[in-house]
Image (tube, grey):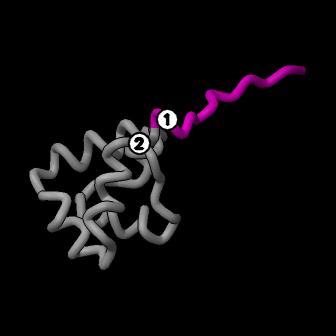
């Protein structure tokens, strides 16, 4: 029996995260301030150069008022 899973690609997750940041209408500076990180780190998320740590990702989802499942492509 062979099972094929839909693989979750990091690049797709990063793109959905970038879109959620853009849709939020919050500035990178405001997001950074709310998360206690630098604006340049948020900029790296937007350029797809970096992905947040798990705790930062969870907090970012809260700030953006979006489900982590949605960013991960699970729904």
- Judged from the image, the secondary structure of the residue bearing numbered disc 1 is helix
Q: Residue furthest front?
A: 40
Nearest the camera: 15 or 69? 15
Residue 54, compared with residue 19, is above or below; it is: below
Kindly identify which numbered label has been placed on residue 71. none
Kindly identify which numbered label has been placed on residue 48. 2
Q: Marks 1/2: CA distance?
A: 8 Å
Coordinates of residue 30 in the picture (x, y in percent)? 15, 67
Nearest the camera: 34 or 47? 47
Residue at 56% across, 34% down: 9
Coordinates of residue 5 in the picture (x, y in percent)? 69, 28
Quick check: 5 left or right of 54?
right
Instruction: Single out the mark in the foreground, 1 or 2.
Output: 2
- Judged from the image, the secondary structure of the residue bearing numbered disc 2 is loop
Q: Answer with mark 1 or mark 2, whichever residue precedes in sequence.
A: 1
Quick check: 71 left or right of 18?
right
Residue at 26% across, 40% down: 19
Coordinates of residue 72 in the picture (x, y in percent)? 47, 44
CB-based contact (under 8 Å), mark 1 and mark 2: yes
Residue position marked by numbered label 1 in the rendering: 11
Residue at 30% across, 70% down: 38
Disc 1 crowd rating (10 Å Cα; few below 14, some 14-19, many 20+) is few
Residue 64, compared with residue 55, is above or below; it is: above
Quick check: 6 left or right of 17?
right
Nearest the camera: 64 or 39? 39
Q: Main secondary structure of the magenta part?
A: loop
Residue 67, compared with residue 55, is above or below; it is: above
Magenta stretch contains residue 11: yes
Extent of the magenta region = 1-12
Query: Looking at the rendering, which quadrant does residue 57 occupy?
Result: bottom left
Q: Quadrant of the N terminus?
A: top right
Magenta stretch contains residue 68: no
């Amino acid at each position: 029996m062979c099972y094929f899973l839909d693989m979750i690609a990091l690049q797709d997750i990063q793109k959905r995260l970038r879109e959620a940041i853009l849709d939020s209408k919050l500035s990178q500076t405001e997001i950074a301030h709310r998360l206690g990180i630098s604006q340049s780190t948020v900029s790296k998320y937007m350029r797809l150069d970096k992905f947040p740590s798990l705790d930062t990702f969870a907090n970012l989802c809260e700030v953006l008022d979006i489900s982590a499942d949605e960013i991960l492509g699970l729904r």
